[in-house]
Amino acid sequence: MRKKLFKWHSIGALIAILPVIIISITGSILVFKTELDAWLMPNKMTVNVDSTQQRLSLDTLITNVQKNNPKYEVATWEIFDDKSRTDTAYLIERGTHVWAKVYLNQYSGEMLSEPVGTSDDLTDWLLDLHYKFLLETKGMFIGAIVSLILLFLGISGIILYRKFWQHFFTLRIKLAARIFFSDLHKMVGISASPVLLILAFTGAYWNILLVAHEVTEHVIEEPYEMIAPLHNTGLSIQSLYEKSKSEIDSFKPTYLVLPFEPKMDITFYGEVDTPNPLNSEYSNMVTFDKNSGKTTFMQDIREANVLMVIDDSFRKLHFGYFAGLTSKIIWCVLGLSPVILAFTGLYLYWFRKRKKFKKS
């Protein structure tokens, strides 16, 4: 059984070696996506205001975006009030289902960019490469398969080297290259396995959900083409924003979703004061009827069931920002371990094949 598992471990690694390397390198870079965006695009991503400066109302900001981009409809909105990071509005071009985004100063209303594609910026392009290999729905499916293979490699590696503690710190540098690479492969694999298992499982989970959504919404059904707002434009979005904060104790909205498909309503996602460091900034939500503005749904993560709490924790666990810079650095370094595992494993596979060839 161990020989069969070892064989399948090797086959799985060979099949997934290239996409795993791509996912590993891009993922480690994307751990610092926010920091990289601020460094690469400071004029778009950062504002410099004093602590007393107040945000303009969402009604004013949305009207300003629509006025400056008449060919688009506002669909979603990233909301920030940390006096340093800009808001991002996500738009849909009228008569299409093509998305774009613009950056703006939420304190002055100044537009900081023209509409750009959601994969045009460098880190967004890397994100596209990371989870769908620039291949849209087909790429999501490939990403899900690769993540499942990586999950299998992590589990099978732990089983194969379940007695790792006996020689965990053994790295025989002065002996043959095969022995050194074997020791290095085991050490890196076991050390990184907890993080790799988390990354593989959460990655596969999200990609499978995304594939199912794309098939349902954009294959089985024709994708909806935005022509005009789908909500009552007489409603004050700023009033709904303020109302959402009173619906859930300590609720702080971080993301607005306006209806961009006929069945959708107006929803604010956000964060609350919670002792759980894995609760994400999108874990709570307040939904309003798109016509009347009445509250139709609320979700407080502090009162949610266990499955919902676990599902929400995947965001911080996958991107590694649950403990600030410390966890980001750990996730970045260990996220690169598949690159080492790929090259050491490939060498060991080549060595075994060469040895068998010489015997024959």
Image (spheres, helix red, strand yellow):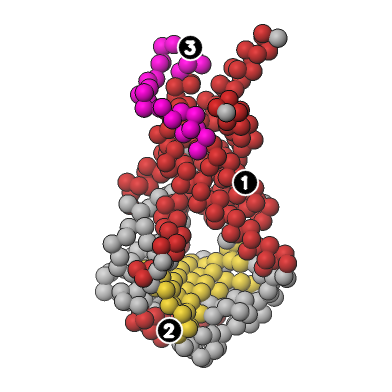
Of badges 2 and 3, the one in the foreground is 3
- Residue 156 included in the magenta stretch of the image: yes
Q: What residue is shown with label 3?
A: 176
Confirm whether residue 205 shows in the render: yes
Q: Amino acid at mark 2?
A: Leu
User: Mark 3 vs mark 1: which is more N-terminal?
Assistant: 1
Q: What residue is shown with label 2?
A: 240
Q: CA distance from mark 3 to mark 1?
A: 35 Å
Q: What residue is shown with label 1?
A: 145
Please indicate whether residue 239 sits to the left or right of residue 210 in the image: left
Q: Amino acid at mark 1?
A: Ile
**Which circle marks residue 279 in the picture?**
none
Query: Disc 1 on helix, strand or loop?
Result: helix
Give the quadrant of the N terminus: top right
User: Mark 2 vs mark 1: which is more N-terminal?
Assistant: 1
Residue at (59, 66) in percent of width and height: 100
Please indicate whether residue 181 sits to the left or right of residue 278 in the image: right
Q: Position of residue 227 (x, y in %)?
A: 66, 80
User: Mark 2 vs mark 3: which is more N-terminal?
Assistant: 3
